Image (cartoon, rainbow, N blue to C red):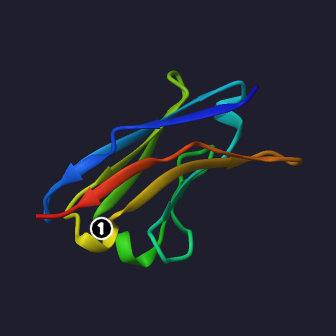
Amino acid sequence: QVQLVESGGGLVQPGGSLRISCAASGISFRAYTMDWFRQAPGRQRELVASITVTGNTYYVDSVKGRFFMSRDNAKNTVYLQMNSLTVEDTAVYHCHTQTSTREFWGQGTQVTVSS
């Protein structure tokens, strides 16, 4: 059974930093691209960042230079380091991956940026 479990969300002031994590189990973690999506109230879910099996990364324009995604294959975990946070970054952040036949989502972790 594949499980993706996010952690590390919380409340942070504008300009602050936060690191969220996603621990995977039940999957050959190192064989798959991993993604972070986010969804804010009233907005469509959007892909924020991805990391390939070789460590190449992709970021949506709005977070480039502020967010950094990494993976630790020994721990079956991906991270999203978020810096210079703004209120626009407030959302539920979900971990995601997909195989050739299925896609998997974590339950999400809430990130709230507010003064």
At label 1, which amino acid type do we have? Answer: Gly
Residue indicated by mark 1: 65
Q: Residue at x 32, y 49 (%)?
A: 81
Name the residue: 65% across, 31% down.
Answer: 3
Query: On the image, which quarter does residue 1 sit in?
Result: top right
60 sits to left or right of 114: right
Residue 29: percent from the left, percent from the top? Answer: 65, 32
Question: As drawn, which residue projects farthest toward the right?
Answer: 101
Residue 36 sits above or below residue 25 on the image: below
Return the x and y of residue 89 as percentages of the image width and height: 33, 67
Pick the front one: 16 or 40: 40
Circle 1 SS class: loop
Q: Residue at x 53, y 47 (%)?
A: 55
Tell me which residue sits at (28%, 64%) in the image.
66
Q: Position of residue 19 (x, y in %)?
A: 30, 44
Vertical side of 71 occupied by 92: above or below: below
Quadrant including the C terminus: bottom left
Above or below, 31 relative to 56: above
Q: Image quadrant of residue 79? A: top left
